[in-house]
Amino acid sequence: MKGYVNIPKNIYVKRCKDCGARPIIALIDEGAYAVKCPVSDTHYHTKPGLIDLEDWNQNNPSSNDYNLNTMSTI
Ligand SMILES: [Zn+2]
């Protein structure tokens, strides 16, 4: 991973279905990006290519509540 950028707060994205983290945009290769969880590479990430927030949102369907308390109960 060569680097990453945070997704601006005014852009709507769902949180990681596995851990509830807000995703980041990782620079995989020249001109290829992936939307991924910042916590673990094993959590869902989009295929390298264009920044595909739609794909991320579709694959993290249960994470649209922003309740971080669910993490502390594990
Ligand atoms: Zn995650």
Image (spheres, rainbow, N blue to C red):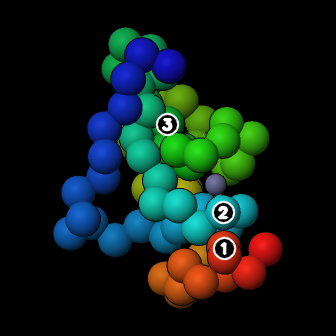
Position of the C terminus, as image quadrant, is: bottom right
Answer whether labels 3 and 1 touch (C-beta < 8 Å): no
Location of residue 5 with respect to 54 vertically, above or below: above
Residue that badge 3 annotates: 34
The tag earlier along the polypeptide, 3 or 1, is 3
Q: Quadrant of residue 70?
A: bottom right
Element marked by disc 1: helix
Q: Does the Cβ of the disc 2 residue fall within 8 Å of ligand 1?
A: yes
- Asked if the residue at label 3 sits under 8 Å from ligand 1, the reply is no
Residue 51 % position (x, y): 40, 42
Amino acid type of disc 2? Cys
> Residue 72: x, y in percent?
66, 76
Name above or below for residue 1 compared with residue 44.
above
Q: Nearer the viewer, mark 3 or mark 2?
A: 2
Question: Label 1 vs label 2: CA separation?
Answer: 7 Å
Q: Are marks 1 and 2 in contact (CB under 8 Å)?
A: yes
Residue matched to label 1: 71
First in sequence: mark 1 or mark 2? Answer: 2
* Residue occupying the point 40% across, 41% down: 25
Q: Would you place residue 46 above or below residue 31 in this image?
A: below
Number of callouts in the render? Answer: 3
Find ligand 1 in the image and state its quadrant: bottom right
- The amino acid at mark 3 is Ala
Label 3 vs label 1: CA separation?
Answer: 25 Å
Q: Nearer the viewer, mark 3 or mark 1?
A: 1
- Residue 2 appears left or right of 9: right
Which residue in the structure is indicated by mark 2? Answer: 19
Residue furthest toward the right?
A: 74
Estimate how packed mark 1 is, as few (under 14), some (14 to 19) or many (20 or more) residues with alpha carbons within 10 Å: few
Q: Badge 2, how many Cα within 10 Å: few under 14, some, many 20+?
A: some
Q: Is residue 17 visible?
A: yes
State the SS at label 2: loop
